[in-house]
Image (tube, helix red, strand yellow):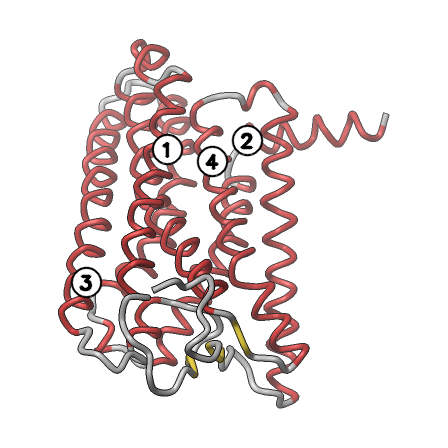
């Protein structure tokens, strides 16, 4: 099926996140405010990493990739949702819907593996500091980041190919504010139960494997911190890891709730609530977590502010 030039069926209809009641207008304003904060925070974080050479390290390289993923996720979902709400036009083309599925799945899968790589980076930094420059050289870091993106691209190509191979001969009203795989499958007039079971199994594996790396890495880090003789060394090690652990908790908290139960067991309202968390709220919080709880970022920010004032 050619999803980019589909002429036999009408466009999909996104029912959206809000109606047009006064309270929904207020909630929509909050979503736009959160999106603007996410956009500003992630762009400033990327510029700050680029501007300060002290932040040109593997850890901040991986953090810049997280910011790019967050910007991609938000840019995929929020503009179309806002345009549909403001214009009253709820249609989205088959090509636009496939693009949303591709980008959302790509970023979601890639970020799972990137968070695991960041945990491995912290493990090497704390447990093997003398070997850190060798194990985490720039070539290795670039290859790791590239591998994360490629995992996401491969996953998304499979999803798009399968989802749009099913016939959609009934209602094309998507009870969501963007095209998400479980919601689309509910509209198909074919039996998608086998594919949904495969999605569930793949999601569990793709989340549990990186989570296993994260847990193993931080277990070793905790043991190393306990055996450190100096209090200052313990504090520094914990400080560098606490921000990443917070983001892992945010990401996997929503992800495990979403994917550890089958799509058939969730309602459309639950899907919308969970999707709002990982497409809007988490991208807004991530740069704040990494900035406010990191002395190096705060020092770099003050340095840049001082340069601008001069």
Side of 152 where 280 appears, left or right: right
Q: Which mark is residue 295?
A: 2
Pointer 2 local density, CA inside 10 Å: few below 14, some 14–19, many at least 20: some
Residue where numbered disc 4 is placed: 63
The answer to whether 236 is drawn above or below residue 260 in the figure is above
* Mark toward the start of the polypeptide (3 vs 2): 3
> Which element carries disc 2, helix, strand or loop?
helix
Query: Which dot marks residue 201?
Result: none
On screen, residue 145 above or below 41: above
Of the image marks 3 and 4, the number of the one nearer the N terminus = 4
Residue in the foreground of this view, choosing between 230 and 199: 199
Q: Which residue, given by chain and number where applicable, does mark 3 sit on?
A: 200
Q: Residue at x 47, y 80 (%)?
A: 10
Q: Position of residue 5 (x, y in %)?
A: 47, 64
Q: Residues within 10 Å of mark 3 (few under 14, many from 20)?
A: some
Among numbered discs 4 and 2, the one appearing first in the sequence: 4
First in sequence: mark 1 or mark 3? Answer: 3
* Quadrant position of the C terminus in the picture: top right
Q: Quadrant of the N terminus?
A: bottom left
- Alpha carbon distance from label 3 to label 4: 28 Å
Point out residue 34 in the picture as x, y percentages from the top left corner.
60, 61
Spatial CA span between label 4 and label 1: 17 Å
């Amino acid at each position: 099926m050619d999803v980019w030039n589909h002429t036999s069926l009408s466009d999909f209809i996104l029912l959206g996140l809000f109606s047009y009641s006064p309270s929904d207008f207020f909630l929509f304003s909050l979503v736009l405010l959160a999106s603007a904060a996410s956009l500003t925070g992630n762009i400033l974080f990327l510029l700050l990493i680029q501007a300060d050479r002290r932040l040109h390290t593997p850890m901040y390289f991986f953090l810049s990739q997280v910011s790019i993923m967050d910007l991609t996720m938000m840019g995929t979902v929020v503009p179309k949702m806002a345009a549909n709400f403001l214009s009253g036009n709820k249609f989205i083309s088959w090509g636009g819907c496939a693009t949303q599925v591709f980008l959302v799945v790509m970023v979601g899968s890639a970020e799972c593996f990137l968070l695991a790589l960041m945990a491995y980076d912290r493990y090497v930094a704390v447990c093997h500091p003398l070997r850190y420059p060798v194990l985490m050289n720039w070539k290795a870091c670039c290859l790791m980041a590239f591998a994360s993106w490629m995992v996401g691209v491969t996953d998304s190509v499979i999803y798009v190919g399968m989802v749009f191979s099913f016939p959609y001969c009934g209602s094309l009203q998507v009870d969501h504010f963007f095209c998400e795989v479980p919601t689309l499958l509910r509209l198909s007039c074919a039996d998608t139960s086998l594919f949904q079971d495969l999605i569930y199994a793949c999601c569990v594996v793709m989340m549990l494997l990186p989570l296993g790396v994260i847990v193993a890495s931080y277990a070793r880090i905790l043991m190393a911190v306990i055996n450190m003789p100096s209090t200052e060394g313990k504090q520094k090690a914990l400080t560098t890891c606490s921000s990443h652990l917070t983001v892992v908790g945010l990401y996997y908290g929503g992800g495990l709730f979403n994917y550890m139960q089958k799509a058939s067991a969730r309602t459309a309202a639950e899907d919308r609530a969970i999707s709002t968390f990982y497409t809007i709220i988490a991208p807004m919080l991530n740069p704040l977590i990494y900035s406010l709880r990191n002395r190096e970022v705060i020092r770099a920010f003050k340095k840049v502010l001082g340069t601008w004032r001069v």
